[in-house]
Image (spheres, helix red, strand yellow):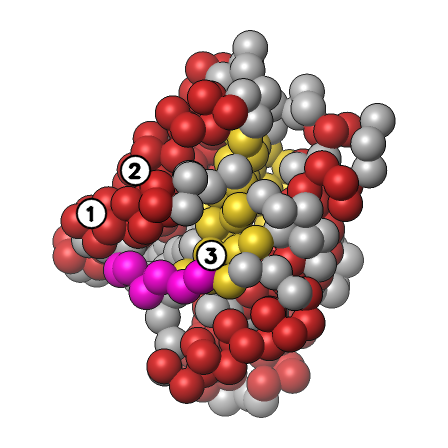
Amino acid sequence: MSNNLNLLAGKLALVTGSTSGIGLGIAHSLAAQGVNVVLHGFGTPEAIGALKQLFVEKYKVKVLFSGADLADSKQVLELMSMLDTEGGADIVINNAGIQHVASVEDFPLDMWQKVININLTAVFQITQHALPTMKQKNWGRIINIASVHGLIGSTHKAAYVAAKHGVLGLTKVVGLETAQTGVTCNAICPGWVLTPLVQQQIDVRAAQDHSDNEKAKKALLGEKQPSQEFVTPEALGALVVFLCSEAANQVRGAAWNVDGGWVAQ
Ligand code: NAD
């Protein structure tokens, strides 16, 4: 078995939502293996310029960037055409996602649609466009960053939980449709990871409970995550690198939770 370095160096990975949080951690882990990366997401031109420079200097890999809004299917197509001009992505990490917290009765339809578009429909569209080239090369990795909320529910997260359950369904279907090829499709289901997406929820909680940031963090973890520790983007990046390795050739259609024991309860 060849080592990861030889296998992955020079491949091209799209990591959606890699200007922040988990996606950024995954992009670092892949670039550290010599993988060329398409960074993607929102950010100021200065922040994006600095990020690209950091990756080029630190990892000596090719770095591209797209700011396509995944809520807009036309922009998703533009992103995929950009990848086509590079010969297509060998690795796709469908990571970008948003959250909206409200009870079902109060959930605005436009927010429902936005969450479904970004967290589920864009994953389908990107996968659909990436697959033919991967199949042609007979090698590819599609890794969807779902959530424990793809496996179980929580209150006030109807659109997110529905989208993430959908992502796991899609992962299984793509895993089956590629089962006799060198392309694999799997999902990772993180528990709480301390990123801007979760910090927003900590801020709301601190305000509601009239407590501070540290107490709100402890309350959040204490409620759901038995380890009482946050999962790190670095740990998720390491799992992505494993799923891209030859050792994972027969991991197909899986939903791999990394959640401090959340769904074991
Ligand atoms: P984050 O808010 O730190 O990063 C989200 C990324 O997505 C950013 O790069 C942002 O620019 C991009 N993005 C958001 N909306 C976009 C849009 N319309 N078009 C294009 N890009 C867009 O979030 P995170 O916590 O790193 O979450 C990343 C993924 O991990 C999400 O799919 C999320 O559901 C999932 N997840 C997060 C946690 C957690 O605890 N943080 C747990 C489980 C799953």
Tell whether position 103 is magenta: no
In front of the other: 116 or 261 = 116
Q: Position of residue 194 (x, y in %)?
A: 60, 69
Q: Dividing the image into 4 quarters, which one contains the C terminus?
A: top right
Q: Is residue 202 above or below residue 262?
A: below
Cβ–Cβ under 8 Å for marks 1 and 3 = no
The residue carrying mark 3 is 38
The image's mark for residue 63 is none
Amino acid bearing label 2: Gln
Q: Quadrant of residue 47?
A: bottom left
| 162 left or right, relative to 216 | left
Q: Quadrant of residue 157?
A: bottom left
Instruction: Determine the secondary structure under disc 3.
Output: strand
Q: Mark 1, mark 3: which one is toward the viewer?
A: 3
Amino acid type of the residue tagged 1 in the rendering: Ser
| Left or right: 217, with 40 as reference point | right
Span colored in magenta: 64-69
Q: Are marks 2 and 3 in contact (CB under 8 Å)?
A: no
Left or right position of 20 against 163 = right
Residue located 24% across and 50% down the image: 78
| 2 vs 3, front mark | 3
* Residue identified by numbered label 2: 125
Residue drawn at (62%, 51%) of the image? 35
Quarter of the figure that contains the N terminus: top right
The residue located at (47%, 69%) in the rendering is 19
Work out how far the residue at label 2 is from the one at label 1, CA to CA, in angstroms: 8 Å
Q: Badge 1 is on which residue?
A: 73
Secondary structure under badge 1? helix
Q: Nearer the viewer, residue 165 or 132?
A: 132
- CB-based contact (under 8 Å), mark 2 and mark 1: yes
Up-down relation of residue 28 to residue 122 (above or below): below
